[in-house]
Image: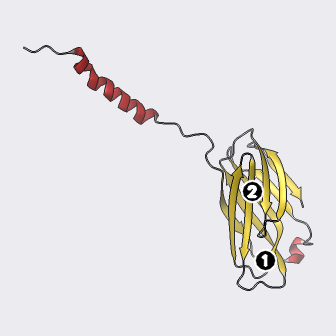
């Protein structure tokens, strides 16, 4: 009768335990992930009488949850004939730049106020961010600094 070698007998058990450990525990993703923009929405041209005057804009900054921030403007001026709007986000350290682009086949000789709403995702609690809002021509429309917290509720008047 052949004797069992303890090394060959326990090797499959040890390998099985390692596989089970990796399957159930897995590699933990790096916290935070890449900051990105979601839910980017623009209103149609707002009625000037309803909004008031066009030379100021109110920017609301509110935490949605423990890693997302909602930014809403109420009176951002864009060309009246623009039909396509895009956004882009770039992150460099703690600087977040959100660029808003507008396209019109034939631009009109007028502007209208619009409300802009979007969310910044994968923010880290306790981290200080410099947020820059840019318009089509890379004009810094508004900038502010904040320490992200799930209780953030700010208002800025431009």
Which element carries disc 1, helix, strand or loop? loop
Residue 154 appears left or right of 121 = right
Residue 116: % across, % down: 76, 66
Which disc number belongs to residue 14? none
The residue that label 2 is drawn on is: 97
Which element carries disc 2, helix, strand or loop? strand
Q: CA distance from mark 1 to mark 2?
A: 25 Å
Residue 128 appears left or right of 157 = left
Point out the frontmost of discs 1 and 2: 2
Residue 32 appears left or right of 11 = right
Work out which quarter of the rendered image holds the C terminus and state it. Answer: bottom right
* Closer to us: 85 or 97: 97
The residue that label 1 is drawn on is: 45
Residue 115: % across, % down: 78, 68
Q: Label 1: few (<14), some or many (≥20) within 10 Å?
A: some
Image point 27% across, 26% down: which residue?
Answer: 12
Image point 68% across, 62% down: which residue?
Answer: 88
Q: How is the image coloured?
A: secondary structure
Q: Is residue 157 above or below residue 149?
A: below
* Residue 13 picture quarter: top left
Q: Is residue 120 above or below residue 52?
A: above
């Amino acid at each position: 009768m052949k004797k069992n070698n303890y090394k060959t007998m326990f090797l499959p058990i040890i390998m099985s335990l390692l596989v089970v450990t990796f399957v159930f525990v897995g590699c933990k993703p790096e916290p935070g992930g890449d900051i990105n923009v979601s839910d980017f929405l623009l209103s149609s041209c707002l009625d000037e009488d309803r909004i008031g005057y066009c030379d100021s804009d109110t920017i609301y900054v509110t935490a949605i949850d423990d890693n997302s921030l909602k930014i809403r403007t109420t009176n951002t001026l864009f060309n009246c004939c623009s039909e396509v709007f895009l956004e882009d986000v770039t992150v460099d350290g703690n600087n977040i730049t959100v660029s808003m682009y507008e396209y019109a086949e034939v631009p009109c000789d007028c502007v209208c106020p619009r409300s802009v709403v979007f969310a910044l995702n994968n923010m880290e609690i306790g981290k200080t961010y410099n947020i820059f809002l840019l318009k089509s021509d890379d004009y810094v429309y508004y900038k502010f600094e904040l320490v992200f917290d799930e209780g953030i509720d700010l208002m800025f008047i431009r």
